[in-house]
Image: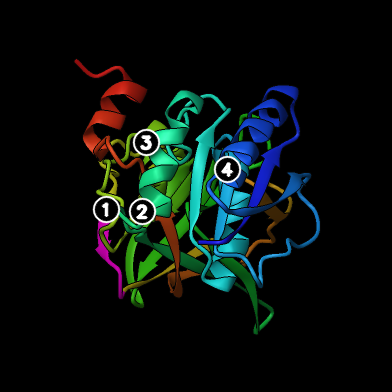
Amino acid sequence: MKRALLLVKDSDKAKETARYISNLLRKKGVMVSLALNRGKGTLPLRDKDLMVVIGGDGTFLAGARIASRFGVPVVGVNEGRFGFLTEIEKEEAEEAFEAILTGRVKPQRRMMISSYLLRNSKKRRLGTFLNDVVVSKSAISRIMEVEVFADGKFMVHVHGDGVIVSTPTGSTAYSLSAGGPILMPESRALLVVPVCSHTLSNRPVVLPAHNTVVLRHLSGTGSCFLTMDGQVGMDLKRGDLIEVRASKRVCKIFTHPYKDFFEILRNKLGWG
């Protein structure tokens, strides 16, 4: 790896860490360029071998969507809060990058999902995402209604606050706080999680990755919002269909070279 792009959260602490990582990489013979994550525009990745994200999971998700288009692997240095995706701490960076740059560790290939909007008999592609697609209520104290279909078969009618369709990587994000299970990040599956369902028997369901999930919005226009990776969103109209399926694209992620997934869960979630 000879060329790296550092995508940096727009905060003083992250910028300070970026200077440290930049110097570290240059000493190892890597050409480094920097970009601030301001949520707009594209990134110069065509000639890069690595993207280093310095920030939290939100910055990581923004970078991962772009890096996956070019097949560029991503590694995260944590300057956020939880850091499920930005696994490496600043004080661990030198040892971690030594392992990555010398090829002692290989990137994981993480499943991504593509979403589509079907409205008035027209289908529009919305993008490809690493974590999740969420249909949720936008009106206070209103119950929303969503029908869920899996491969054309009716699954459930949800009355509640929304429905999450998540990847295994996204199982430690919104899905986790809504009561969904944790999936091993390299697995291939779709996770459907009702949010605050008013039918207590509604439970999360894990589907094979080859399934296509369709959410039909049945509430009034303006009462429902679609969010993807917690960063891209739009209002929905009554009768809109949201189609979610596994993408052909994957996100290549360098995880922590010396900590396994369960150790990271214990640290982040405070498990005994």
Q: Are marks 2 and 3 in contact (CB under 8 Å)?
A: no
Image: 114 above or below 252: below
The kind of secondary structure element at disc 3 is helix
| Amino acid type at mark 1 | Val
Residue 75 in the figure: left or right of residue 51: left
Residue ID for mark 4: 27
Q: Are marks 1 and 2 in contact (CB under 8 Å)?
A: yes
Alpha carbon separation for disc pair 4 and 1 = 48 Å
Alpha carbon separation for disc pair 1 and 2 = 5 Å
Alpha carbon separation for disc pair 3 and 1 = 13 Å
Residue 102 inside the magenta-drawn segment: no
Residue ID for mark 3: 176
Residue in view at x 57 percent, y 48 percent = 52
| Amino acid type at mark 4 | Lys
Closer to the eye: label 3 or 1: 3
How many marks on residues? 4
Residue ID for mark 2: 192
Residue in view at x 50 percent, y 54 percent = 74
| Amino acid type at mark 2 | Val
**Dot 2, crowdedness within 10 Å: few (<14), some or many (≥20)?**
many
Extreme residue in the bottom direction: 121
| Magenta segment boundaries in residue numbering | 206-210
